[in-house]
């Protein structure tokens, strides 16, 4: 995962220290971990701890909170021990750091202790900007680890694909899509699902494997409904919809599945040959969208998107009958937007 582009004039653009993505974390006297994605920050912390422990099993690991910091804690933990064991000091909640931590951290990075790594987690905001600026300017000889939020579908697909690639296992594209679709809101849950599939299955991971473990997830049901409707199979889509609702599916993510697929189709349909990188999509997503677009017209797709937006409002309280609104959406999409 490449580091995001840095706008000119920003603090990050002015940084003189290396900036690396979470999975490329490495030892340094001071490590600043920034970005809103707490799960990736935790992953980076574990990766670093394991790497340091592999180098020296006697590694001492200490945890501090910058918001409830007591004067002298950092210096005490960084002081050489009797046997000279290496140390990893992990500092959390730096985005709400106390004045005492700010003052002592600034003093510490001016002369970091030997054989000690101090990892500071700052999730965002202006609190402690003086410390962040000093670290980014090179004081302490540190690095910055970027834990950006995985907002795009392609980012989550890449993350999940990397989980299986790292384990040396193959997952079919359709299975990967079903898995990511089942965990669209929680990266930690997605990672846990990947690990469960790796632990509980053998060989290639297929769509059937994912359905066996996570077929009951609302979002997976939603995408099955959307796929059938977009392909023009009205009866099948309606049966799937009613089954999903009968088993407890929430109408809101059902509509979200339709909206996501329709937006992807519109993006690919209007790109006229744009690359995966330009579109922010994985290559297989583009191929799937092109197949989905067969039989659709621009006016029909436009109407379907409008109806999806109206249905989204309906299921969120704008209409009395959310089920009727969903069934109308299925009918319109199955008719490729031409149903009147």
Image (cartoon, rainbow, N blue to C red):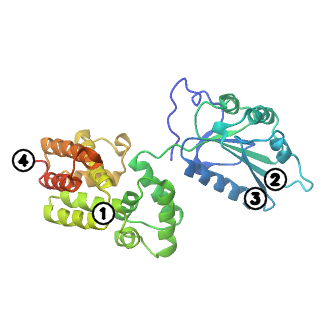
- Which of these two is toward me, 316 or 36? 316
In percent of width and height, residue 31 lies at: 69, 42
Numbered badge on residue 340: 4
Numbered badge on residue 86: 2
Q: Is 23 situated left or right of 320 in this image? A: right
Q: Earlier in the sequence, mark 1 or mark 4?
A: 1
Q: Earlier in the sequence, mark 2 or mark 1?
A: 2
Q: Tell whether label 3 touches label 2 (CB within 8 Å).
A: yes
At label 4, counting other C-alpha atoms closer than 10 Å, the crowd grade (few under 14, some 14-19, many 20 or more) is few
At label 3, counting other C-alpha atoms closer than 10 Å, the crowd grade (few under 14, some 14-19, many 20 or more) is few
Q: Secondary structure at mark 2?
A: loop
Task: Mark 3 vs mark 4: give the one in front.
Answer: 4
Q: Tell whether label 1 touches label 2 (CB within 8 Å).
A: no
Residue occupying the point 50% across, 60% down = 191
Query: CA gap, disc 2 to disc 3?
Result: 10 Å
At label 2, counting other C-alpha atoms closer than 10 Å, the crowd grade (few under 14, some 14-19, many 20 or more) is many
Query: CA gap, disc 1 to disc 4?
Result: 27 Å
In percent of width and height, residue 81 lies at: 89, 52
- Which of these two is toward me, 319 or 27? 319
Q: Is residue 295 above or below residue 2?
A: below
Q: Which residue is mark 1?
A: 221
Q: Is residue 100 above or below residue 217?
A: above
Residue occupying the point 24% across, 61% down = 225
Q: Tell whether label 4 touches label 1 (CB within 8 Å).
A: no
Q: Which residue is mark 3?
A: 55
């Amino acid at each position: 995962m490449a580091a995001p582009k840095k706008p000119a004039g920003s603090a990050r653009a002015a940084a003189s220290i290396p900036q690396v993505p979470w999975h490329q974390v490495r030892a340094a006297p001071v490590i600043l971990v920034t970005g809103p994605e707490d799960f990736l920050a935790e992953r980076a912390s574990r990766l670093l701890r394991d790497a340091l422990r592999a180098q020296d099993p006697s590694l001492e690991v200490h945890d501090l909170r910058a918001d409830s910091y007591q004067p002298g804690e950092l210096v005490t933990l960084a002081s050489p021990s009797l046997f000279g064991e290496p140390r990893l000091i992990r500092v959390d909640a730096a985005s709400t750091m106390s004045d005492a931590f700010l003052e002592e951290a600034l003093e510490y990075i001016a002369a970091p202790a030997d054989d000690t790594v101090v990892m500071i987690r700052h999730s965002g905001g202006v609190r402690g900007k003086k410390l962040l600026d000093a670290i980014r300017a090179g004081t302490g000889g540190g690095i910055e680890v970027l834990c950006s939020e995985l907002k795009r579908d392609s980012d989550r697909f890449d993350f999940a694909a990397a989980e299986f690639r790292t384990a040396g296992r193959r997952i079919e594209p359709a299975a990967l899509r079903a898995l990511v679709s089942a965990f669209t809101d929680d990266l930690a849950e997605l990672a846990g699902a990947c690990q469960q599939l790796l632990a509980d299955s053998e060989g290639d991971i297929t769509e059937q494997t994912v359905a066996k473990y996570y077929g009951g997830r609302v979002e997976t049901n939603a995408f099955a409904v959307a796929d059938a409707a977009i392909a023009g199979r009205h009866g099948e889509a309606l049966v799937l919809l009613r089954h999903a609702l009968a088993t407890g599916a929430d109408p809101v993510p059902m509509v979200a599945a339709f909206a996501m697929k329709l937006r992807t189709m519109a993006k690919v349909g209007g790109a006229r040959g744009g690359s995966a990188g330009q579109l922010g999509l994985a290559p297989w997503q583009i191929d799937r969208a092109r197949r989905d677009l067969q039989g659709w017209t621009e006016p029909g797709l436009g109407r379907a998107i409008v109806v999806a937006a109206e249905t989204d409002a309906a299921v969120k309280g704008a209409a009395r009958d959310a089920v009727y609104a969903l069934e109308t959406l299925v009918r319109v999409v199955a008719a490729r937007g031409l149903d009147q």
